[in-house]
C-alpha cells in the first residue's frame, strides 16, 4: 500500500502505511540479526535491519517498507528452494521400513514386530505393496519387486525362490513373498543408503566454504564503507548528507551476499538429490565438485568392467595326487569362508557335481593372502588356493609338469582366470580356469569416456592374458592395461598418476585435473581411498563402499557417466551464479553513483538476483520421477504410504502402477 505514494498528490500520505510493514516485518529479522551479532558476526539480516532503520530515520517510509517486505519474500523463497532440494534427499531417509511381518516357525502365525528387532534367519512375509524389511533370500513365492528407491532402476525386477532381495524395495507383484533375512535392518542395503545420504548432507564443499568465508570478510567491509557514506557527507550540509546516506543504504542492500550464500548450497543439494534419485550416492558437495574435475578414470577389472559372475570352465587334477571329487571337496572347504566372487564360483561348482563339504574335517587359521589367494590348515596340512604369483612365491609352480603349465598359459591367453590348489609338502594337486562375462555397458562407457577426452586405464591382479582380453574387448589400448597388481601396487599406481595431475586454470572450483578410481572389492579399498574420487559398485564389498566417495547402488556403469556430467553441471552452475551475481551488483552500484537507483529498486534487484541464481541451481533437480539413464525409456510412477504401495489391494486384482 505504501508503494502507492509514488503516484503523488493525495496518495502521498499512504507512505505512512510503510511503518506497519516495518513494525510487523522487521522484528523476526532483528531477532536473527541479534543472534548473529552475539556471535560477533555480521550477515544479511544485520544489513537489512540497518537499511530499514536508516530509511525510517530519513522518513523514506515507502523505501523502508520495500526493504522489510521484499526481504521477507526473499527469506520465504530461500526456505522454499532449500526445503525442496533437502526433501529430495530426505525422502530417501524415509525408505527404512518401520515394521516386519515375522512368521512364527512353530505355529505359522504372522506376528507384526518393529523392523529393528529382526534377527538374521527370521522368515518374514512380504505381501503385495509391502516394503521388504531387510536384505534376504526368497524361500517361497515369485513376484515383481520395485528397487527404484535404491537403484534408480524404474522397471520392476522379477524375483523367484532363491533370489536375493534388498531391504527397502517393494513387492509390487501379485504374490506374497516369504523371505529369510540375511542381515539385520541396520546392516541392510537401505540402511547403508541412508547412512551415505546423511553423510552427504553433512559434508560441505571447498567452494561452499570459500563463499561463506568471503561473505564473512566482505560484509563488514561493505558496512564500514556504507557507514562512512552515511556519516561523513553530513559535514557538507543536510542535503548532501541525506543524498549520500540514502546511497549508503542502497549499497548495504545491494551488497548483501545472500544470492551467493543461498544458491551455492542449493545447487549442491539439487545435484546430490538428482544423483540419489537415480541410485547414485555422492558423499557431499565436495565429492560432487571433484567429479566435475575428473580427467583420469581408472577401472578395476573383476566385478567392475566384468560382472564378477564366474563360470568354472576347466578343472584338472595334477599327477594323480587327488581325485576330482577330493579336489572339489578341498576347494569348497577353502573357499566357503571367502567373499570373493571366485570363491563362490568354486563352491557352486562343487555343489553342481554333487560334492559337499567333507565330514570330520577341520579347517583352521583361514586367512586371505591379498592379491594372491587364501590359505588354511586342513587337518594339520597347510593348503593354498590362489593365482600363479602365489605358487611361484611358494616355489610350487616350477615343479608343475610342462603340460599343466602349457594349459594354464593357453587358458590365460584366452582371457580366463587361472588358479591352482596346492598342499605344503605335496605340491600342486589341481589347476582350474574360470571365465567372467564383460558387463554389457562396459564397452559403451569406456568409448564414451575416451570420446569425451578422458584418459581411461584398467588395473587388475589377474594375469596378462585375462587382462589384455578384457581390455581389448572394452576398447582399451595395451599401454593402459596394467595386470598382476597387488592391492598395494594399485594404491601406488593411483598415487603416481595423482602426482602427475596438472593445474586446471579453467575451473574456478578446482585446482587440478583429478583421478577417479572405480572398483568393487576389498582389494580395491586402498586405491579407492587414495584416489581423488573413489567410486564403488553397489554389489561389491561393504568396505569398498565405506572407503569410496560415490556409490553406484545398482552397479550400472552408465551412471558413472551421469555422475561425472552432473559434477560438471554443478561447477558450471556455480560459476554462472557467481558471475551473474557479481555483474548484477556492479551494475546496481554504478547506477547508484549515477543517482538512478532507489532502495525499492535495490532490494527488488537483490531479490531478483537471489531468485534467478537459486532457480538456476534448482534446474539440476529432475522434473519428475527418476528415469533409467541406461535406457532412457520408461519410468514407473509410484507413491508409498505407511510402508505399503498406495492403492495396492490386500487381495484380489492388483492394478499395476501407471506407466509414464
Image (cartoon, rainbow, N blue to C red):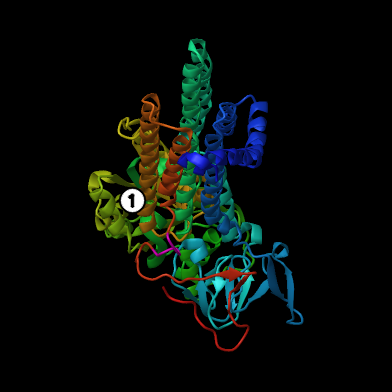
Q: Residue furthest bottom?
A: 652
Q: Nearer the viewer, residue 568 or 352?
A: 568
Q: Is residue 398 above or below residue 320?
A: above
In the picture, residue 164 is in which quadrant? bottom right
Highlighted range, magenta = 623-628
Q: Nearer the viewer, residue 168 or 592?
A: 592
In the image, taking residue 76 as reference, residue 427 lies left or right, namely left
- Secondary structure mostly seen in magenta is loop
Residue pictured at 46% horizontal, 42% vertical:
7
Q: Nearer the viewer, residue 94 or 468?
A: 94
How packed mark 1 is, by other alpha carbons closer than 10 Å (few <14, some 14-19, many 20 or more), is: many
- Magenta-span inclusion, residue 591: no
Q: Residue furthest top?
A: 235
- In the rendered view of the protein, which quadrant contains the C terminus? bottom left
Residue 631 lies, in percent from the top left, at 34, 66
Would you name the residue on which mark 1 appears?
Answer: 463
In the picture, residue 598 is in which quadrant? top left
Q: Is residue 79 above or below residue 176?
A: above
In the image, taking residue 404 as reference, residue 605 lies left or right, namely right
Residue 353 appears in view: no
Residue 303 lies, in percent from the top left, at 41, 57
In the picture, residue 506 is in which quadrant? top left
In the image, taking residue 232 as reference, residue 365 lies left or right, namely right
Residue pictured at 26% horizontal, 48% vertical:
452
Residue 125 lies, in percent from the top left, at 65, 76
Residue 635 lies, in percent from the top left, at 42, 70
Amino acid at each position: 500500500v505504501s508503494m502507492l505514494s509514488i503516484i503523488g498528490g493525495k496518495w502521498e500520505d499512504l507512505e505512512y502505511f510503510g511503518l506497519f510493514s516495518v513494525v510487523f516485518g522487521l522484528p523476526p529479522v532483528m531477532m536473527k540479526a541479534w543472534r548473529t551479532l552475539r556471535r560477533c558476526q555480521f550477515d544479511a539480516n544485520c544489513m537489512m535491519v540497518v537499511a530499514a532503520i536508516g530509511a525510517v530515520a530519513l522518513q523514506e517510509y515507502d523505501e523502508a517498507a520495500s526493504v522489510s517486505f521484499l526481504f521477507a519474500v526473499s527469506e520465504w523463497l530461500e526456505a522454499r528452494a532449500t526445503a525442496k532440494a533437502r526433501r529430495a534427499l530426505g525422502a530417501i531417509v524415509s525408505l527404512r521400513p518401520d515394521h516386519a511381518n515375522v512368521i512364527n516357525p512353530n505355529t505359522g502365525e504372522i506376528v507384526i514386530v518393529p523392523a529393528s528387532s529382526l534377527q538374521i534367519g527370521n522368515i518374514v512375509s512380504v505381501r503385495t505393496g509391502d516394503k521388504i524389511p531387510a536384505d534376504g533370500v526368497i524361500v517361497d513365492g515369485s513376484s515383481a519387486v520395485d528397487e527404484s528407491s535404491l537403484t534408480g532402476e524404474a522397471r520392476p525386477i522379477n524375483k523367484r525362490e532363491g533370489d536375493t532381495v534388498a531391504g527397502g524395495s517393494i513387492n509390487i507383484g501379485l504374490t506374497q513373498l516369504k523371505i529369510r533375512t540375511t542381515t539385520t535392518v541396520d546392516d541392510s542395503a537401505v540402511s547403508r543408503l541412508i547412512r551415505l545420504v546423511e553423510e552427504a548432507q553433512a559434508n560441505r564443499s571447498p567452494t561452499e566454504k570459500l563463499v561463506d568465508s568471503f561473505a564473512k570478510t566482505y560484509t563488514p567491509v561493505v558496512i564500514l564503507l556504507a557507514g562512512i557514506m552515511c556519516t561523513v557527507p553530513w559535514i557538507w550540509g543536510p542535503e548532501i548528507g541525506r543524498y549520500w546516506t540514502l546511497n549508503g543504504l542502497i549499497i548495504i542492500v545491494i551488497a548483501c551476499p545472500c544470492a551467493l550464500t543461498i544458491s551455492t548450497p542449493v545447487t549442491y543439494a539439487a545435484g546430490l538429490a538428482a544423483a540419489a534419485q537415480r541410485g547414485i550416492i555422492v558423499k557431499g558437495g565436495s565429492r560432487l565438485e571433484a567429479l566435475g574435475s575428473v580427467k583420469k578414470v581408472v577401472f578395476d577389472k573383476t566385478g567392475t568392467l566384468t560382472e564378477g559372475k564366474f563360470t568354472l570352465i576347466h578343472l584338472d587334477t595334477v599327477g594323480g595326487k587327488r581325485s576330482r571329487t577330493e579336489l572339489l571337496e578341498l576347494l569348497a572347504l577353502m573357499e566357503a569362508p571367502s567373499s570373493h566372487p571366485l570363491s563362490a564360483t568354486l563352491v557352486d561348482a562343487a555343489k553342481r557335481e554333487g560334492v559337499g563339504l567333507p565330514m570330520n574335517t577341520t579347517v583352521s587359521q583361514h586367512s586371505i593372502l591379498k592379491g594372491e589367494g587364501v590359505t588354511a590348515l586342513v587337518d594339520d596340512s597347510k593348503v593354498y588356493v590362489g593365482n600363479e604369483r602365489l605358487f611361484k612365491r611358494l616355489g610350487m609352480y616350477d615343479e608343475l609338469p610342462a603340460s599343466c603349465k602349457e594349459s594354464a598359459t593357453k587358458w590365460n591367453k584366452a582371457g580366463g582366470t587361472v588358479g591352482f590348489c596346492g598342499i605344503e609338502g605335496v605340491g600342486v594337486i589341481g589347476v582350474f580356469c574360470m571365465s567372467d562375462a564383460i558387463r554389457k555397458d562396459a564397452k559403451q562407457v569406456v568409448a564414451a569416456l575416451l570420446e569425451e577426452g578422458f584418459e581411461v586405464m584398467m588395473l587388475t591382479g589377474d594375469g596378462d592374458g585375462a587382462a589384455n582380453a578384457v581390455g581389448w574387448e572394452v576398447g582399451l589400448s595395451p599401454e593402459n592395461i596394467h595386470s598382476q597388481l597387488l592391492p598395494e601396487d594399485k594404491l601406488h599406481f593411483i598415487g603416481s598418476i595423482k602426482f602427475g595431475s596438472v593445474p586446471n586454470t579453467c575451473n574456478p572450483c578446482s585446482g587440478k585435473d583429478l583421478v577417479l578410481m572405480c572398483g568393487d572389492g576389498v582389494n580395491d579399498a586402498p586405491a579407492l581411498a587414495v584416489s581423488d574420487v573413489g567410486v564403488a559398485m553397489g554389489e561389491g564389498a561393504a568396505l569398498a563402499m565405506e572407503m569410496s566417495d560415490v556409490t553406484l547402488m545398482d552397479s550400472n556403469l552408465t551412471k558413472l557417466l551421469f555422475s561425472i556430467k552432473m559434477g560438471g553441471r554443478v561447477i558450471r552452475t556455480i560459476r554462472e551464479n557467481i558471475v551473474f551475481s557479481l555483474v548484477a551488483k556492479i551494475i546496481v552500484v554504478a547506477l547508484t553513483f549515477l543517482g538512478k537507483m532507489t532502495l525499492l529498486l535495490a532490494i527488488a534487484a537483490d531479490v531478483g538476483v537471489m531468485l534467478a541464481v537459486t532457480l538456476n541451481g534448482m534446474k539440476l533437480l529432475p522434473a519428475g520421477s527418476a528415469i533409467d539413464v541406461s535406457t532412457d525409456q520408461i519410468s514407473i510412477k509410484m507413491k508409498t504410504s505407511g510402508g505399503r504401495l498406495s492403492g495396492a489391494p490386500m487381495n484380489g486384482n492388483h492394478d499395476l502402477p501407471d506407466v509414464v
